Image: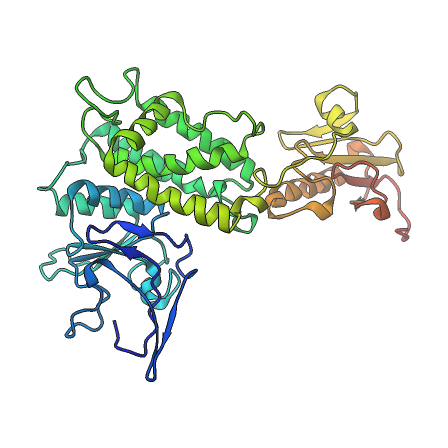
């Protein structure tokens, strides 16, 4: 750290063991307190055991510890690393836990020297006897396995070579955590992984929890002599440390997206429910991490920032009445269907305004009562509707010639009659130039 005159951005208070005791929220620059003197303006910051830049001969160091783990309490990926540190009793002079805000935030030039993509957690290796030729590690699984190797002689081993543990860790990181943002990210952050819309990502998230449930086999979790239901028997594993923080997210967030919020489905499958409840109740370290994460989720994300109020399928839902199109989609009302797939349905208009007049609609309205209601949640389906409309306009078997008029009426002033977004494809003759 540089001397007076430099602004230090740090929003975590860390006690001697490295545990976070004060949570200021997910974004690291939310809370600051300035102190003005006659010579400098500085930002108040507190870290563990005053390790931060206390060495006058090391003014450029953010901590004098052997390692610095850049993390915040709500980080579910960083939490697996904290579980390892807490279980092994690693003191803060060996691994100091510091917010990325200490370097100016995730996107700051200083932080990205450690984590090139500005991701969290990140581990800075500062010890003098570093034989690995690398000064920092990004990605939580890499950091976790480094910590297990570095401190292998202390505390539980976390079963780093256990096949079930490694399978769960890998599945979690590739298929579950990669789409976990569907539970809390705003529409502006879509798509989520391979899923262009939130509904599809949430469905996949639930499926992958079921897959992990299947890895537990008939015997489920725990062991004959175990007082805690660990995933791989009687001993805690890296799978427990990896999956537990995501289970905290899932247990708190998934019910918000259930169609029946008064009686939502269990967020976790049965064996994972037993495991999760057992760890957060009967294991001191997992209980501690549960409180760290939940403190931010409840106090900051929910009560202060109202994060889910503006998120589709949680705070925002399609409450408009069903329309005649819903009855056509269900087959209750017959229609001359010309094209359909899992996303769209196209059928002839019963009151055609041209020799060829096809309506193209989304099968799942998903809030699209009108085009004005479209958000980033609907980018994929809007594209599918227009692609289908273009293909239909090229289909001479449907009566189209050299082109068509493709129209979306929006609202009463636009002539919309059914509150379910629909695309008109009109052709079969040369159409006039007037639109109203």
Q: How many marks overall?
A: 0
Q: Is residue 143 above or below residue 278?
A: below
**Residue 171, image x, y percentages:** 34, 34
**Residue 167: which quarter of the image?**
top left
Identify the residue at image location x=38%, y=60%: 106
Q: Is residue 100 above or below residue 413?
A: below
Say if residue 403 shows up in the picture. no
Question: Would residue 18 appear left or right of 10 to someone viewing this image?
Answer: left
Question: Would residue 5 appear left or right of 135 to someone viewing this image?
Answer: right
Q: Quadrant of the N terminus?
A: bottom left
Residue extending farthest top: 218
Q: Which one is nearer the viewer's eye here, 324 or 430?
A: 324
Q: Which one is nearer the viewer's eye here, 26 or 242?
A: 26
**Residue 77, image x, y percentages:** 33, 45
Which color scheme did the rendering employ for the protein? rainbow
Say if residue 168 shows up in the picture. yes
Q: Which one is nearer the viewer's eye here, 69 or 195?
A: 69
Identify the residue at image location x=69%, y=40%: 368
Identify the residue at image location x=42%, y=56%: 27
Residue extending farthest bottom: 38
**Residue 180: which quarter of the image?**
top left
Q: Is residue 179 above or below residue 117?
A: above
**Residue 22, image x, y percentages:** 33, 53
**Residue 322, image x, y percentages:** 74, 29
Question: Would residue 185 appear left or right of 47 to someone viewing this image?
Answer: right
């Amino acid at each position: 750290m540089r001397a007076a005159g430099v602004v230090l951005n740090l929003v975590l208070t860390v006690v001697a063991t490295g545990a976070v005791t004060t949570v200021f929220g997910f974004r690291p620059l939310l809370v600051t307190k300035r102190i003005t003197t006659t010579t400098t303006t500085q930002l108040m910051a507190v870290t563990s055991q005053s390790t931060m830049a206390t060495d006058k001969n090391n003014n450029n160091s953010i901590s004098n510890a052997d390692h610095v783990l850049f993390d915040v309490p709500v980080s579910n990926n960083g939490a697996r690393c904290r579980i390892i540190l807490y279980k092994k009793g690693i003191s803060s002079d060996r691994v100091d836990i510091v917010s990325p805000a200490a370097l100016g935030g995730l996107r700051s030039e200083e932080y990205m020297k450690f984590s090139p993509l500005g991701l969290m957690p990140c581990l800075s290796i500062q010890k003098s006897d570093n034989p690995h030729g690398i000064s920092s590690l990004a990605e939580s699984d890499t950091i976790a396995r480094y910590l297990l190797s570095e401190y292998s002689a202390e505390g539980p081993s976390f079963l780093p070579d256990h096949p079930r543990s490694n399978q769960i860790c890998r599945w979690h990181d590739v298929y579950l955590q990669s789409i976990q943002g569907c539970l809390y990210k705003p529409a502006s952050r879509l798509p989520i992984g391979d899923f262009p819309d939130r509904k599809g990502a949430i469905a996949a998230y639930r499926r992958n929890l079921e897959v992990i449930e299947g890895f537990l086999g008939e015997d489920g979790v725990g062991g004959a002599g175990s007082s805690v239901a660990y995933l791989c028997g009687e001993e805690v594993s890296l799978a427990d440390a990896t999956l537990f923080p995501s289970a905290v997210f899932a247990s708190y967030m998934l019910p918000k997206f259930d169609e029946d919020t008064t009686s939502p489905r269990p967020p976790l499958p049965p064996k994972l429910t037993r495991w999760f409840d057992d760890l957060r109740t009967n294991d001191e370290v997992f209980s501690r991490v549960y409180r760290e994460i939940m403190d931010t989720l409840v106090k900051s994300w929910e009560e202060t920032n109202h994060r889910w109020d503006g998120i589709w399928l949680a705070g925002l839902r399609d409450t408009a009445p069903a329309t005649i199109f819903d009855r056509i989609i269900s087959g209750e009302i017959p229609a001359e269907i010309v094209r359909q797939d899992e996303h769209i349905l196209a059928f002839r208009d019963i009151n055609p305004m041209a020799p060829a007049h096809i309506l193209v609609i989304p099968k799942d309205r998903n809030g699209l009562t009108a085009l004005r209601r479209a958000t980033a949640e609907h980018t994929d389906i809007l594209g599918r509707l227009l692609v289908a409309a273009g293909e239909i306009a090229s289909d001479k078997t449907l009566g189209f010639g050299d082109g068509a008029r493709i129209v979306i009426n929006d609202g009463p002033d636009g002539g919309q009659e059914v509150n379910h977004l629909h695309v008109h494809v009109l052709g079969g003759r040369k159409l006039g130039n007037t639109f109203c």
